[in-house]
Image: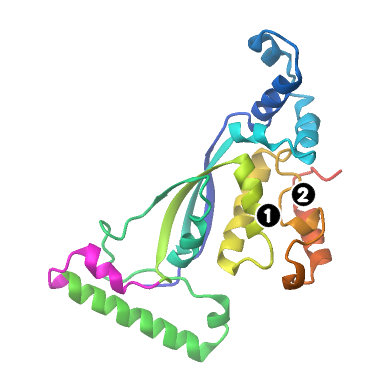
Amino acid sequence: MEEARVKVKLLKYTSDPELTAAFAAKLCYSSEADIEILQNSIEKTDQLEFIEKIVSIGHHSVLEHVSFTFGIEGVSRAMTHQLVRHRIASYSQRSQRYVKHKGGFEYIVPPSIRANKELKLKYENFMCKIANVYDEMIEAGIPAEDARYVLPNACETKIIVTMNARELLHFFELRCCNRAQWEIRCVAELMLEECLKVAPGIFKYAGPSCIKEKCKEGDMTCGKAQDVKRKYEKLLRKYNRLN
């Protein structure tokens, strides 16, 4: 039984995501009668500037034709309880009903607890006690679907997530914000970096609202908008998409 570390991997995504979105957008404004002719007219060399413009003006419906599938592990059940609240998405999560955690389980240690040596030790000891009780139940013939009731929110889990690009922009706006809970913010930032690797034009303006407009948190703002902007400018420069 040990502390788990978060990992995010982009497993699959729509082939030529920016070309797909650009084609959908051009269809909306084209008088061309033949879809195949219109498709062939879109050159790879000019699609990026066009899709960046479409995203910047808010024509986001065309982004629903593009999807991304992520494999996420080393995260807590507490985090995935937040994640699945984003309803325009598909999820497949490792089951605690059918997968037994006999012999101990990995768990997440929040940074605030990790920083306190005394409480971190108590936390780890408590995880061990839970694991021992769980094992006793399994050995006594208690079904895993009932023994799992003692497992904590800290228990590590794995989940596959599929979202379309439009929902991802919304997800990043909410969950990359400093006001978001630390673990889901970490996952969101890693997901965004994966997206920027394959579709920098679509996600050029992705991130918390304060990087492109006034913070939407009002009195609850973190007060660090300039620091956040610099952070995301650095990220965009990494993928050569900052104009």
Image-based side of 231 in relation to 172, left or right: right
Q: Mark 1 or 2 closer to N-term? A: 1
Residue 11 disc label: none
Q: Which quarter shows the C terminus?
A: top right
Mark 2, secondary structure of its residue: helix
Q: Where is 65 relative to 203, above or below?
A: above
| x and y percentages locating residue 129 in the rendered image | 31, 82
Q: Position of residue 142 (x, y in %)?
A: 16, 69
Q: Residue at 60%, 51% (x, y): give it.
A: 191
Q: Secondary structure at mark 1?
A: helix
Residue 170 x, y percent position in the rendering:
65, 49
Name the quarter where the N terminus is drawn.
bottom left
| Vertical arrangement, residue 85 with respect to residue 239, above or below | below
Q: Badge 1: how crowded within 10 Å, few (<14), some, or many (20+)?
A: many
Quarter of the image where one finds residue 76: bottom left
* Residue carrying label 2: 236
Rendering quarter of residue 228 = bottom right
At 79% from the left and 42% from the top, the residue drawn is: 241
Q: Which residue occupies the foreground of this view, 129 or 60?
A: 60
Q: Is residue 167 left or right of residue 239?
A: left
Please state which amino acid type lies under the numbered disc 1. Answer: Glu
